[in-house]
Amino acid sequence: METTIEKPTVMIVGAGLGGLALGILLERAQIPYDIFERTSAIKPLGSALSIGPNLIPFLEQVMPIDDFFNVSKPMTDVRSYNEQRQFVFSSDFSPIEELTGYKQHIIARPVLYDLLLRQIPSNRVHLNKRVLDIGEKDDKVFLRTSDNGYYEGDILIGADGAYSAVRQRLYESLRQKGQIPKSDLEDLPFKCTCLVGQTEMLDQEEFPQLKEPICQFWSTLGENKPYSWVTFTTGRTICWMTIEHLSKQSTKAAEDERFRHTDNSEWGPISAKAMCDETRTFPIPGGNGSLTMGDLYDRTPKHLISKVMLEEKVFETWHSGRVALLGDGA
Ligand SMILES: Cc1cc2nc3c(=O)[nH]c(=O)nc-3n(C[C@H](O)[C@H](O)[C@H](O)COP(=O)(O)OP(=O)(O)OC[C@H]3O[C@@H](n4cnc5c(N)ncnc54)[C@H](O)[C@@H]3O)c2cc1C
């Protein structure tokens, strides 16, 4: 006798990298799903991501893999420089290929985001849907959005980033029942703040490193200052990242500033501008020998420069009932 198994309906909160990746898998498995995203438009933010043997097999299964190879560059080493633009040492990544059969690749975060988004029908992603509340009722899970929307499904996935609203709601209810370890209720620690961005298309004569088929991944360590800065070539652009390594005192100042800004994934243009101004004279190797981070900031659209924190925590509790957390949310 033929049995039919009803497929569950999945609600995903957050159309970030994690939410989209899950959406792609559900699309392939023909499991009904909807993605609820708080922003009104998808903003191509970030610098570059390093993708290797842990993720390329996933991409091979969900898209023509040349789409990925055509917009990323293989990376074989990371070269470190001092502030005099002198080469200091290099970390060799080539054993990764010997061990796994896959090269490590560098791709601009906005480009990877766009690749994933293209695998999902647009009617599955609902913008302007900030999730405020979740709960379970009569064998269903529900969510409420800031525009008074109410939605029900069988499984709810919180893929809504480091400051996940789903996690906060889930933990509130578990806390009332005494079912949550104390460590899960503590603040997210972070030791770095980071400016990230990607330039517009650059002139290859001014930035000859762009001509190299291998990603030029260069890192400079600040002297007597708590900063390091990194540039990566991808296609005709340079992705960059300036990292401030925080002390106890500066962590406190950063936390206070974060507290004043409610939109957690970025601190907005004013804060990013201040950090750009502080760090624009930082020297970078290559070119005519006088390039600085300021040359890259000036060639990056201002609204695509973001300031983010590198939070470091793994929560013990990542699921309960019909709700599970994914990605930075966990
Ligand atoms: C702006 C930014 C730039 C970054 N740049 C880099 C980089 O260059 N290189 C690198 O290696 N890593 C970078 N990271 C970190 C890396 O991208 C993250 O680890 C990764 O994006 C985590 O994916 P995620 O899907 O779990 O969360 P996110 O990518 O943070 O996505 C969460 C999504 O949920 C949405 N959301 C949040 N709250 C709600 C809510 N209540 N209701 C509905 N939707 C909600 C957010 O708008 C967002 O779209 C960056 C992170 C951010 C936020």
Image (cartoon, rainbow, N blue to C red):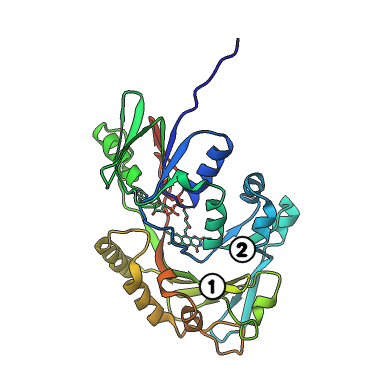
Q: Is mark 1 within 8 Å of ligand 1?
A: no
Task: Label 2, secondary structure: give it.
Answer: strand
**Label 1 sits on residue:** 230
- How far across and how far down the image is residue 281, in percent? 46, 85
Task: Label 1, secondary structure: give it.
Answer: strand
Residue type at the position of mark 2: Ile
Ligand 1 image-quadrant field: bottom left
Q: How many C-alpha atoms fall within 10 Å of the one at disc 1: few (<14), some, or many (≥20)?
A: many
Give me the disc on residue 194. none
Q: Quadrant of residue 238?
A: bottom right
Residue nearest the observer in this picture, 57 or 221: 57
Q: Quadrant of residue 289?
A: bottom right
Please determine whether, in this image, residue 320 is positioned above or below residue 194: above
Residue at image point 27% right, 47% down:
147
Q: Is residue 199 left or right of residue 184?
A: right
Instruction: Locate the C terminus and report the quarter of the image it occupies.
Output: top left
- How far across and how far down the image is residue 241, in percent? 49, 71
Instruction: Locate the N terminus and report the quarter of the image it occupies.
Output: top right
- How far across and how far down the image is residue 168, in percent? 31, 44
| Marks 2, 1: nearer the viewer | 2
Q: Is residue 124 left or right of residue 248?
A: right
Q: How many C-alpha atoms fall within 10 Å of the one at disc 2: few (<14), some, or many (≥20)?
A: many
Give me the disc on residue 106. 2
Residue at image point 25% right, 43% down:
148
Earlier sequence position, callout 2 versus callout 1: 2
Label 2 with label 1: CB-CB less than 8 Å:
no
Gap between marks 2 and 1 measured at Cα: 13 Å
Residue type at the position of mark 1: Val
Residue nearest the observer in this picture, 265 or 219: 265
Q: Is mark 2 within 8 Å of ligand 1?
A: no
- How far across and how far down the image is residue 253, in percent? 28, 68
Please determine whether, in this image, residue 155 is positioned above or below residue 35: above
